Amino acid sequence: MKNITKSIIALFAVVAFSCTVQDVQDRPVIEGVDSPVLTAPTSGAAYVLSPVNATAQAERFTWKSANFGGSVEVVYSVEIDKKGNAFKTPKELASRKSENQASVSVEIMNGAALALKSTPFTQAEFEVRVKATVGTVVMISNVVGIVITPYTTENPKLWVPGGYAKASGYPNNWDPATSPQLSASAYGKVDFEGYIYFAPFKGVKEEDEYKFTSFPEWKGEYAAGTAPGTIALSGPNFKIPASGYYKIEVDTEKLTYKATATSWAVTGSSTPNGWPDNGVQDHNMTYNPTTKVWTVTLNLSAAEIKFRANDGWDLAYGDDGANGSLEPGNAANIKVPSAGNYTITLDLSSPRNYKYTLTKN
């Protein structure tokens, strides 16, 4: 035990000797001397990004090294932010250790632009810089302005602003950003659809009118065409002839549209009335403008149901995946797992992302 104690004392003595005041004073001091200089891209560089070239290089950022007063490992970060935001919410495009360049792909640049709330397919101004870091010491390069046109591979949308909005349960009248939307069937498609509720008219000016926009702002507008069922790039507002819950379909290539009033119901072998083959009535649902869903409460047996509009099969939904997501047409019937009293909801508020629930009471 005595020998172990002597060894520990000796070890502390060695440590104390090796960490003298003189040794600490002789260590190099890290300080910023010269900031890095961003040399590429140059001011005004413009990038029109496309998903076809997602993995290709959008830009090779280059810079002159920072000087921290000695030979140290420097971490360089290429940052981007919206023009005029003073890099309050920057996104990192690349990070390198003691290097003077970084290749940034189309996909990475596009992701950063979208994260900074830019509008797809619309030019937006950004600023880029290089940040050099050693420990807690940071130096910033010059700032360079660039222009990016980002893309999205999400389904294209149409927004439907109008004077009907507030009375119908939507946030604001004539405000594209908060208006309900229509969705195309896939990226690059032009066949839009969605469901919109129009409350009973009260005689207020333009409350039964609306337009389509290609962006959540007043850009890419579509107005009513001169012939019924057509759209145009300019003209009067569309008018809904009567209040109700409408399926709206638009083709921006053929310049056509269709508005179909719908009233939704549940039918099937699980319901008290069974399938409507023998002329029995469907079980009508009620629409709630606040929750944006249709509901009905029914006693169901352990069998099957479907949703359909207007007491017909022209517009009906089932569930092919048994996952709560609805598919149109000849989709599979919805299985009711066991008999009981159910509250059934139908949610058509998110275009082409239609859902339902069966909740046993």
Image: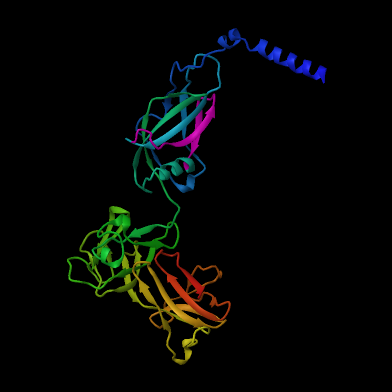
Q: Name the residue at 49% across, 87% down.
A: 272
**Residue 91 or residue 230, whichever sits in front:** 91
What colour-coding does the image apply?
Answer: rainbow
Q: Is residue 202 above or below residue 185?
A: below
Q: Quadrant of residue 145?
A: top left
**Residue 118 or residue 286, whichever sits in front:** 286
Q: Quadrant of residue 18?
A: top right
Question: On the rendered structure, is 228 left or right of 344?
Answer: left
Question: Residue 82's spot in the image, x, y percent?
Answer: 36, 38
Q: Quadrant of residue 41?
A: top left
Question: Residue 123's spot in the image, x, y percent?
Answer: 34, 43
In the rendered structure, which segment of residues is drawn in magenta? 85-106
Q: Name the residue at 50% across, 87% down.
A: 274
Question: Residue 146's spot in the image, x, y percent?
Answer: 37, 35
Quadrant including the N terminus = top right
Question: On the rendered structure, is 19 left or right of 242?
Answer: right
Question: Residue 108's spot in the image, x, y percent?
Answer: 48, 41
Residue lying furthest top in this view? 22
Is residue 102 on the magenta stretch? Answer: yes
Is residue 3 on the magenta stretch? Answer: no
